[in-house]
Image (cartoon, rainbow, N blue to C red):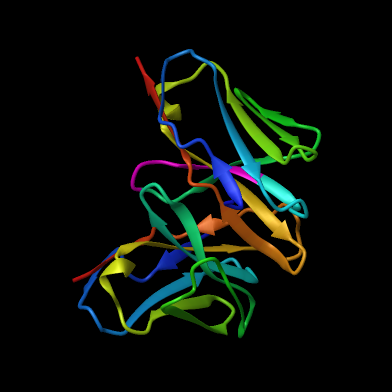
Amino acid sequence: DVKVTQSSRYLVKRTGEKVFLECVQDMDHENMFWYRQDPGLGLRLIYFSYDVKMKEKGDIPEGYSVSREKKERFSLILESASTNQTSMYLCASSLRGRVYTEAFFGQGTRLTVV
Amino acid sequence: RKEVEQDPGPFNVPEGATVAFNCTYSNSASQSFFWYRQDCRKEPKLLMSVYSSGNEDGRFTAQLNRASQYISLLIRDSKLSDSATYLCVVNAGGTSYGKLTFGQGTILTVHP
């Protein structure tokens, strides 16, 4: 059974804290993604990685950074959390090299910044 | 203009109804297309891919019109269990090969 696992389901952090969201996949996928999902806005891509140490900015990268030191792990970092980063964060992975490739999602991390 | 646009609905239909969702995309170089389904408080999951020739999976039919940059999903004989948010997804291709862009989703509620 394929799996994408996010380290926390719920997180509450204070404004200004550095926050790490971790994602691990066990499918040997090259592509990994971080999205945030907000009501009425759908899923918006924050960062995308297509290989170890490789990354591309998505549509809303401001205030975020990422790390991909190992193929199976993709971390999202909020350098200084702000209240407007309160959201549901979803990690996904997919195979590279296929035009039609399914993305598998983790269960999501609901982050609240107070 | 958003890269991928959907009518957010909500669509409220009775069981047995036929319902259609539409989606447009702005990047003509986009390579592949999908519909995902997201249940309340769950992660999105692939419903079906959308091929140029159109494709069908049981009660679900997906169509792609590359000239108009338009994707559709038709659900026939709606079931209560079809209630969910339906997400149109586009693979950008090109230098961003593999990058998936989502529409904002269309909410469907099927009632008895």
Please tell me which residue is depicted at 50% across the width and 76% down the height of the picture: A74
Confirm whether the magenta stretch covers residue B39.
yes
- The picture places residue A5, in percent across and down from the top left corner, at 43, 66
Q: How many marks?
A: 0
- The picture places residue A70, in percent across and down from the top left corner, at 56, 83
Q: Is residue A20 above or below residue B56?
A: below
Q: Quadrant of residue B11?
A: top left
Q: Is residue A58 above or below residue B73?
A: below
Q: Which of these two is toward me, A20 or A15? A: A15
Q: Which of these two is toward me, B57 or B102? A: B102
Confirm whether the magenta stretch covers residue A53.
no
Q: Is residue A55 left or right of residue B40?
A: right
Q: Which of these two is toward me, A82 or B93? A: A82
Which residues are drawn in magenta?
B34-41
Residue situated furthest front in the rendering: B1
Q: Is residue A56 left or right of residue A92?
A: right
Kindly tell me whether residue A1 is visible in this rendering. Answer: no
Please tell me which residue is depicted at 75% across the width and 69% down the height of the picture: B95
Kindly tell me whether residue A63 is visible in this rendering. Answer: yes
Q: Quadrant of residue A38?
A: bottom left
- The picture places residue A56, in percent across and down from the top left corner, at 61, 75
Q: Which of these two is toward me, B39 or B70? A: B70
Most common SS among magenta residues: strand
Q: Is residue A53 above or below residue A22?
A: below
Q: Is residue A76 left or right of residue A25?
A: left
Which quadrant would the C terminus of chain A be assigned to in this image? bottom left
Please tell me which residue is depicted at 36% across the width and 49% down the height of the picture: A39
- The picture places residue A10, in percent across and down from the top left corner, at 26, 64
